[in-house]
Amino acid sequence: MSVDFLHPGETVAVDKSVPALEMRGIGKRFPGVVALDNVDLTLEPGKIHALMGENGAGKSTLIKIMAGVYGKDAGTISLRGREADIKSPRDSLKEGIKVVFQEIALIAEFSVAENIFLEGYPTGKGGSIDWKKIRADAAALFKRIGFNVDPAARTGSLPVSQQQMVEIARALAHEARVVVMDEPTSSLTPNEVSLLFTVIRRLAALGIAVLYVSHKLDEVFEIADTVTVLRDGRHVSTRPIGQHTNDTLIQDMIGRRIENLFPRKRGAPGSKVALSVEGLSTAKKLKDVSFEAHAGEVLGFFGLMGAGRTELAKAIVGYDPITSGAISVDGCRLLPHETHTGVRLGIGLLTEDRKSEGLMGELPVYQNASLASLGAFARMGFVDKVSERKAVQDYVDRFRIRTPSLFQQVKNLSGGNQQKVLISRWLMRGLKVIVVDEPTRGIDVGAKSEIFALIDRLAGEGLAVVMMTSEMPELLGLADRIAVMCEGRLTAIMPRDEATQENILNAAIG
Amino acid sequence: MSLASTDTMKAGPSMLARLVARQELALLLCLILVIAFFSFTAENFFSVRNITNVLGQASLALTAGIGCAIVFISGEVDISIGSLLATIALPLIIIMNDTNSLVLGISGALLFGLIIGVVNGYLTAYAGINSLIVTLGTMFIMRGGVYLYTGQRAIPDDAALDSFIALSDGRLFNVVPYSAVIAIVLLAVFAYVMQHRPFGRQIYAVGGNPEVARLAGYDVRRVKFTCFIISALLATVAGIILAARVGSAQHTAGLNFEFQVVAATVLGGVSLAGGIGSLTGMALGVLILQFLSNGLRGLGLPTEWQLVITGMIIIAAVAFDEAKRRRAIGG
């Protein structure tokens, strides 16, 4: 059975009575967190199955097990009724499972056409790569799915949304029985999304089982036949989409009413400008961004993938160089444009990438927390360990950081507790402005509300909080004002009570 | 339904810009400039004899450079090749002296090279030790071993087989040294593999982004492992030619050779970061440095100055490259 788009008109013989893929009792633990606990999932050939759940629900872990990226700790996987032993991505590909991951999985230096055939180069006489066929087949494939991009273009030179379409096209180039798409629309424009949906429906019509991973309700109602919901690593429900309403789906995903997630205790923000950014531009992304954030305010920045939120976060704390513009913290210019100036003036970044930019995983909790304020504990050039640990213990108590001891290696803490350690690091230092980038990425739902409460408390204590997020509920639940970015520009800034999902999304699309 | 915005189709560089941006073309221009400059300034530079001599001298670095570049492209480094040159000369010369057989001598040398490649590759790819450390270690171990075994005296090639001596002074059609012919053939074979065989593309993919390569079903560790074996075997070939040239197994053979090769490879645009560069670029890098050193000697400049100038050229070339890359990203 070959898909295809390359060979139209071919009908696919599929035994529809046998599930294309069946996962039973899947379990997976990581240090400090149970990612999956006894999860079942059955994919029928020719059907579009949505997998839903909040960040941290276990969706990504489940598909990484399917793809052979992670091993499973418990459970079985069967393909077409036969138990399969998937130990590596190669095993998974051999079984005809094609996963389109959210992160771009293409070689930037290769041409688009070569990336399409990365999983298996067509070869001609004597095993030489048939480059002519690669270019022709890629061009034919693109034409058939209505994707207008030069197959000879260097992949790294394409915008993210087109790279994502290249990945989706790649899943179609080889024989596939199960196609998995992980949040495929996160960086696509509405036009591209409708094109994607056409492609997905055609895949299903060919008898391929499609697993569509998303947390966007409207998309799921539009495309899916069946929905499985995960929450906190557990299977919650699997039902035909017809049995669901918006409310029942949200109920299954969140497990409690959304208001409870965002307990607002702080008062109204002050009028004092804590952070002022004027005409900020960077070489790569940002174009003329200006805004102010007030003491005691949570200013939320929303944008689609590639809109420039992370770039803005890194630029305003002095981490990434800027080409023009002025940044002031409490009226003092951030000059020279370096992070140590930023820390001195009182602005710090809570990074979205805790592992590589935030934590030193091997070091104990207390050293991670005190990192930015070692000077305060220094006595004659030596760190006074006693007062250092006392100060950290203080934060551990205040924020209820769950750790067996101050000496626990921080990598063994759960995502939520790691995030609290990082917040402690900055608060110990005495900040005026804290920039938080995707504060709940990779954090269990249960711990999320604690992080929200913490952010609320930070603003309540008079900090200006600049929050970058791609989570609409987080944005609407926490922010006093909402700024929206698109392609490196600031396209809207509005008070919370004027913001709706529609006008935010419109501004995000540009 | 059109997906791509039309401007991305136009945003690609023009044909001319793309050609100029091609590293190989810029390097070729440099090589022509170097040759032209010395042709006018240095005596006896632009003659068939001198140019084929330089090719012969370059053949060691060209041969070992293929392996060096392939390991770089896979995202690792191999600096053990200089010591390997001295090491494999021992089995080569000893076996030939005992058996009077070139084939047995070369087989012994290749077997030794293979073992070293397996050790480097296993420790890097499967044991997960940083390749710089691994090959630094094997570099010292091999050099120390050679010193110990030889008592720091050369072992002469007593067999003096004609076929072996031909490797050093024989010339194809009486013009091109055999060593250069060997290097050019190997270069052609591996350039073809790197561009036109799935295995070659796997090496680029593994060096370009190992995670993506793994997701595409490649055995990243096996690819890296194989690259170290290729590198060791090619260095063995270079070592055999060197032994023929000096007519003995020398304990100091190939001292600093690894750094000459690394310098030429980097000059040739092969990135230490992996996934970027070509064997053609590496070969041009080797030739530029070799002609430069030959020409400077022709001008009567002392060797010390050649070192200084080589160092400056390498830094300048990589800085230029970096600036170009940054502009490409920033623009």
Image (spheres, rainbow, N blue to C red):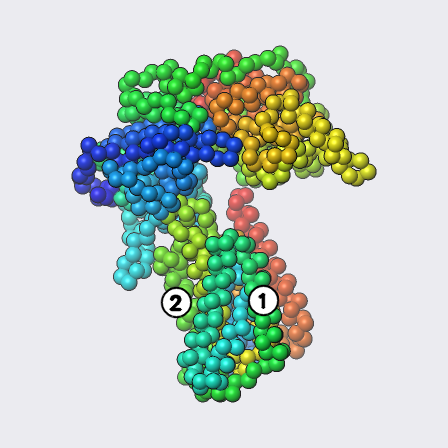
Question: Which chain letter goes with mark 1?
Answer: B
**Which quadrant of the view contains residue B200?**
bottom left
Nearer the observer, A444 or A412 = A412
Q: Earlier in the sequence, mark 2 or mark 1?
A: 1
In the image shown, does A115 or B321 lie closer to the viewer?
Answer: A115
Task: Tell which subunit mark 2 falls on.
Answer: B
Q: Which mark is residue B189?
A: 2
Task: Name the residue type under label 1.
Answer: Ile
Residue at disc 2, secondary structure: helix
- Residue A380 location (% of width, % of height): 82, 38
Which percent across, then down, holds residue B46?
53, 78
Q: Would you identify the image quadrant in which residue A184 lies? A: top left
Instruction: Name the residue tied to disc 1.
Output: B141
**Residue A260: in sight, yes or no?**
yes
Q: In the image, are marks 2 and 1 on the same chain?
A: yes
Q: Quadrant of the N terminus of chain B?
A: top left
Q: Name the mark nearer the viewer: 2 or 1.
A: 1
